[in-house]
Image (cartoon, grey):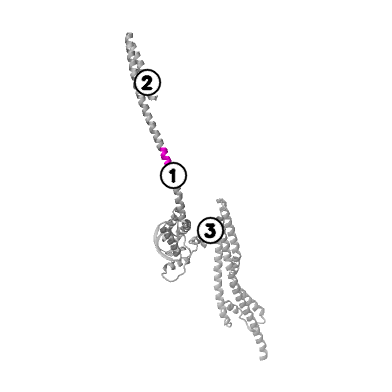
Amino acid sequence: MTPRMRLAIAAALAAQCLAVQGAGAASGSLDELLEKTRNARALQAKANAERERQFLAARDEQSKLVAEAVRARDAAEARSQALSAQYDQNELKTTELQNLLDSRLGSLGELFGVVRQVSGDVSGVVFQSMISAEFPGRDEFFQNLSKAKELPSITKLEQLWYEMLREMTESGKVARFKTDIVAADGAKTPAEVVRIGPFIAMSDGKYLNYLPSVKVLSLLPRQPPGWLTGIADDVQMAQQGYVGAAVDPSRGVLLSLYVQRPSWVERVERGELVNYVILAVGLIGALCAVYQFFYLLRVRVAVSRQLRQLNRPNNDNPLGRVLSTFRGDAEQAEEEAEVVELRISEAVLREVPLLERFQAFLRLAVAAGPLLGLVGTVVGMIITFQSITESGSSDPRLMAHGIGTAMIATVLGLGIAIPLLFVNAGLASMSRSLVQILDEQSTGLLAEMLERGRGEGGAGPRHA
């Protein structure tokens, strides 16, 4: 019995009880009560018959639903068995077709692997290549081909061969093309570019750097020295024939590192005050040396001219002033020999300081240059260690940069000491040669005067 039927029977019994109670209260006699009871029983029998009919109808409906569910189950089981059999057949057929595909592919599977490997290798080269600035979009083809899951078509294989051949061909060409160039401020400007293979590119006498991430050429933040930019101008101006050119075999890496090297002015500025002191000492020494060199050169020319005219002393040169020192009687020269010698020595000594001028300072600069360089090195090392302590890092690049900066002071110290050493030696040699000429001529003058005095003294009595 279903819950619906139970609910209907309970409702009928409740209605009967209510009817009986109402009848008992309203009736005044037992006959009426009996009649009402008989009528209630008839009504109950009629309700029971109706409920039975509904129950039977519901039972038939449930049986029909059960039968339909059983038929659906049987149909589903049959379809499942059919699908399972079809699946097994498809598995067998798939295996047969895969075996047939493998047998027919033969070496094409190995070819597919080789194509993917070659595409992956070439993709990295093309991505970094400066040639991609002239032929954009090539790296995407190689990347897609290296990641493909199916066999490449004949068209893709031909394109792969063509792109590899173009890369090799363009690597040996000097090409001229127009493209956008990114300036230091990020603005793009169309310009004519001259490219030497995948190694270097230039525009308007300036060198360019290829940015693979954005696939454009950009101006180097710092350009190399003037002689390299002059070569770039010559290459761009050339229309035929052969011209010299700078080529970076690392495809831009060495050039980028080269332009980052600080200039000598920047190196000196990093060395702080000591470098300026060293340069000041060297500059003063160089000025003194240049001045004294031209002075000694002029004196040498004047002395050479005076040597050809010893009888006519001239006061514009040291030798003439020495020769003009004694103007006495030749007959009394022997008696005044010591006085004449002292006068001549005095005249020579008077000329020596001018001839040896600045040599003491040059010797001091030669000795002080390396010492000042050592001071600068020590100061630079102290700054380097302070930087390492503040940063808390032992990065070798930081130490190398600091040590390199500190060594500039040593280089400057030796750079002024060594040239000034040779210059001082040359000036000392020139002054010694002039002093030697003065000594020789003064000694010869004294000897000549003494001989002339003795000759005149001996001839006098004979004439008498």
Answer with mark 1 or mark 3, whichever residue precedes in sequence.
Answer: 1
The structure residue drawn at horizontal position 39% and vertical position 33%, both measured from the top left corner, is 69
Q: CA distance from mark 3 to mark 2?
A: 110 Å
Judged by depth in the image, the label closer to the viewer, 3 or 2, is: 2
Residue drawn at the location 41% of the way across and 38% of the way down: 76
Secondary structure state at the residue bearing disc 3: helix
Pointers 3 and 2 in contact (CB under 8 A)? no
Say which residue label 3 marks: 270
Residue under numbered circle 1 = 87
* Residue 94: x %, y % from top left: 44, 49
Q: Is residue 221 above or below residue 356?
A: above
Residue 385: image quadrant is bottom right
Circle 2 residue: 9
Residue 262: image x %, image y %?
Answer: 51, 60
Going by the numbered disc 1, the residue's amino acid type is: Tyr
Label 1 secondary element = helix
- Span highlighted in magenta in the image: 76-89
